[in-house]
Amino acid sequence: MVEDCGGAGWYGEETLDIEAVHSMAPGAKIVYVGGADCNTGLDEAWATTIDNHVADIVTNSWGTGTDKVADLGAEFIAFYQQFSLEAALTGITVDFSSGDAGDETQGGTEPDLKTVDFPADLPFVTGVGGTSVGIDKHGKRVWEHGWQSAYAPLSDDGKSWGESAYSSGGGGGTSILFGQPFYQRGVVPDSISKYFGATRMRTVPDISMPGDPNTGFIVGQTQEFTDGTYYDEYRIGGTSLASPLLAGLQAVQSQKQHHPVGFANPAYYRTAGTAAITDIVAPKKPVLQVRTNFVNSENAADGRQFLLQTVDVQTTTIHSTRGYDAETGVGVPGPAFFR
């Protein structure tokens, strides 16, 4: 199956999921569920996990644009609707990453491409967006903004930065598949829910966690390099990080409450604007930081590449604002999240 499905490309995702959950909930009992094949295997594995109540919290770091899902037909969409509803009715929390391409418009240059990811836009799952986080030398959070990044390369003479280009960001916006769910009424502005017309529609994300690869997470993994195979550590991010981070917090929350969290979205929207949820807003002035990469991706033998990152670029159609926004949802878990 590794040869058939490009398994090596998924190793980092699998590592990230498990290590991110454990970092937030060290005592959590984690069950890894994989697909039997690379056609319908993942769909069937997800449904079986819910049908057999394998876990109280299911985190998923995959998806596709709703414009593509619509081409797969009503049965495919109904399949996911059925099992996500079953999860909600049986007390299972289902989290999905909202995607890593922002509003899919290539940084605002292709506005006709605007869409959100499925299954994150299912009404009975939690769509998890991403943020960029600044941590000082004392380990304290000094800023947090929506994750939408642009990078500019350092010039050859090292004296200036080149033209900045959009790179990636947490997925968000308005679904074309599902009407507005009850928990979003009165919280999501019509300017977002009615983006595509007069009918209020489901919007994502619901809530966010750190996702920016530049301010993200270190994972350890045995990897194959040109000089051999051995354990190494590297940074990683994306909403593939945000979703399992939230799942870990939910595990701690369920332990403290002595019962499963279950379908969490109503609580997130009900407590928006309180100490349970920290609202995320755009920076008042540009926030810039430098990313350093190995040119050959393995070591410094071929030199390093330096990129100037602009945090929370505003060229996309989704932005962080006060209250609900299509970049970070209601915000991020706040100091009273566990109460």
Image (cartoon, rainbow, N blue to C red):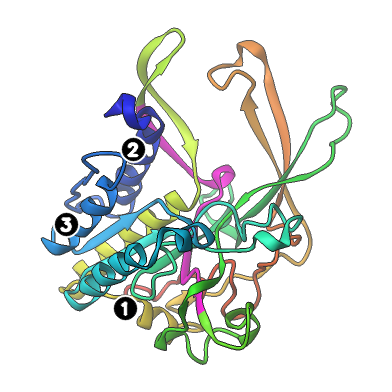
Q: Residue at x 60, y 18 (%)?
A: 296
**Quarter the N terminus occupies:** top left
Using residue 43 as the reference point, say whether residue 134 is left or right of it.
right
Mark sitting on residue 15: 2
**Badge 1 amino acid:** Arg
Span shown in magenta: 202-221
Residue closest to the far top: 227
Q: CA distance from mark 3 to mark 2?
A: 22 Å
Identify the image quadrant of residue 37. Answer: top left
**Quarter the C terminus occupies:** bottom left
Provide residue 261's location: percent of width, then percent of height: 24, 73
Label 1, secondary structure: give it.
loop
> Residue tagged by mark 1?
339
Q: Looking at the image, is mark 3 or mark 2 nearer the viewer?
A: 3
User: Magenta span has 206?
Assistant: yes
For disc 3, the neighbor class at 10 Å (few under 14, some 14 to 19, many from 20) is: some
Q: Looking at the image, is mark 1 or mark 3 nearer the viewer?
A: 3
Secondary structure mainly formed by the magenta segment: strand
User: Does label 3 or label 2 sit earlier along the sequence?
Assistant: 2
**Badge 2 amino acid:** Thr
